Image (spheres, rainbow, N blue to C red):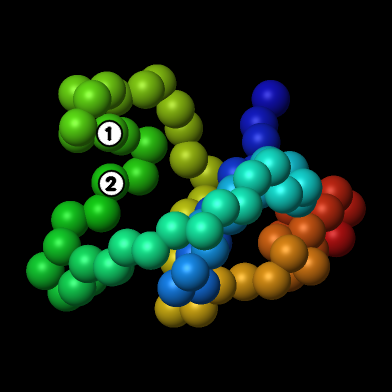
């Protein structure tokens, strides 16, 4: 059993999606690290010393926030 999880950040709003449906959206301001030198953790939280038992099938990172319709199209079954 799997779920499609997606997060977007457009510079002022952080949003989360589960199986193509938006589950939260909140105003948030933070700076993205310089990816040339920063470490990116996926499926891990160094601050909590947590390493959940997860399997990732695909990881997609884009330089711009995707709109909700595009998130749905990535998840939509049978497409």
The residue located at (66%, 36%) in the rendering is: 3
Residue 52: horizontal and vertical position, in percent?
Answer: 37, 22
The residue located at (32%, 63%) in the rendering is: 30
- Residue nearest the observer in this picture, 31 or 35: 31
Residue at numbered disc 1: 45
Quarter location, residue 63 = bottom left
Kindly give the residue lying farthest to the right in the view shown.
Answer: 78
Contact check, label 2 and label 1, Cβ < 8 Å: yes
Kindly give the residue lying farthest to the bottom in the view shown.
Answer: 63
Q: Residues within 10 Å of mark 2 (few under 14, many from 20)?
A: few
Disc number placed over residue 41 in the picture, else none? 2
Lateral position of residue 58 relative to residue 48, left or right: right
Disc number placed over residue 69 in the picture, else none? none
Q: Considering the image in quadrants, where does the N terminus appear?
A: top right
Residue 9: horizontal and vertical position, in percent?
Answer: 49, 65
- Residue nearest the observer in this picture, 77 or 13: 13
SS label for mark 2? loop
């Amino acid at each position: 059993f799997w779920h499609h999880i997606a997060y977007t950040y457009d510079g002022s709003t952080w949003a989360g999606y589960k199986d193509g449906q938006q589950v939260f959206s909140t105003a948030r301001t933070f700076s993205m690290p310089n990816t040339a030198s920063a470490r990116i953790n996926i499926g891990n939280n160094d601050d909590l010393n947590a390493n959940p038992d997860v399997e990732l099938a695909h990881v997609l990172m884009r330089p711009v926030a995707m709109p909700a319709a595009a998130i749905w199209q990535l998840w939509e079954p049978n497409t």
